[in-house]
Image: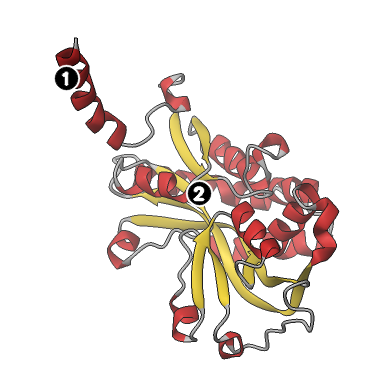
Amino acid sequence: MKLILLTLLFFSIPLMATGPRITKSAISPDKKEVFALDAPPFISIEVENGGMLNEIAVAAFKEAKIDTVITILPLYSMVRYYLTQEKAMVIIGRYMDLNAEDKKSVITIPLYTAQESYLYSKSKHQKGLEYKGELSIFKGLTYGASEGEETGKYLEAGITVVKGRTLSLFKKLQSGTIDFVSLPDESAQWFLQNKFAEHKDDFATMQTKSVTADISIYFNLNNPDGQKSAEGFKNGLRTIVKNGEYAKILGKYIKNPDTVNMQAQNIQKFLK
């Protein structure tokens, strides 16, 4: 009996090491699977209809007549695994930390351009923190980086970097483990309203924007369907931008019409 158990354990180890295997495509094998990183309110299992970018991706694929199913994953490492190891056809995410070789193997199409701001805890920094375009002012502090985010500029400025998921970063910010984070304004607002409603006044936002970052869809050229699907999706996205469906979807989540119009114009420029 011991020999049988040891044998089963030995053969199960490689299976566990290959990564997550149960996905929606196992239920719908006729559909092409899209892997997306959970990032509310843009795309998430916690947001109605999967979030604004989930709806936009579905609409664009529908226009392109590409039958897909979107699997939203909680971890950056899982999404990256499917892209680089499983040669998944397409992924969606904010930061993918792609090296030069990886970038040659993907077609990147932005879905939304996010303005990001730095947040900090008022209790730890009672005199406040303010970003004025130079990171050197934060030398000696600890920055909470999103998984996949490029952090070289922080390290060069003498800032310690801790990486994690957004919810974990908020908790670290609240406890004082880290000093500041950079998040899309929409994400910061969503987490403060939905996860830290009773403590939202404990956090402050620096006035100067930290960075502008695209949330994009990445088509894998190492997948046999990658090139053709990218071309089809781009045409589908172009159609829903022109017919107003893109703006209509955003308008369900974003109440500022100027922001919606700006996003539609940004995407339209890219698609020309």
Q: Is residue 18 left or right of residue 166?
A: left
- Quadrant in which residue 257 is drawn: bottom right
Q: Earlier in the sequence, mark 2 or mark 1?
A: 1
All told, the count of numbered labels is 2
Q: Position of residue 118 (x, y in %)?
A: 67, 73
Q: Residue at x 41, y 62 (%)?
A: 97
Q: Residue at x 51, y 31 (%)?
A: 69
Q: Is residue 33 positioned above or below 158 on the image? A: above
In terms of secondary structure, where does tag 2 sit?
Answer: strand
Q: Is residue 93 positioned above or below 29 on the image? A: below
- Label 2 belongs to which residue? 92
In terms of secondary structure, where does tag 1 sit?
Answer: helix
Q: Is residue 272 visible in this depiction of the protein?
A: no
Q: Residues within 10 Å of mark 1 (few under 14, many from 20)?
A: few
Q: Is residue 104 left or right of residue 41?
A: left
The answer to whether marks 2 and 1 mark residues whose Cβ atoms lie closer than 8 Å is no
> Dividing the image into 4 quarters, which one contains the N terminus?
top left
Q: Is residue 199 left or right of residue 10?
A: right
Q: CA distance from mark 2 to mark 1?
A: 39 Å
Q: Is residue 267 positioned above or below 198 on the image? A: below
Q: Residue at x 77, y 71 (%)?
A: 123
Q: Is residue 28 left or right of residue 2?
A: right
Between marks 2 and 1 in the image, the one whose residue lies nearer the viewer: 1
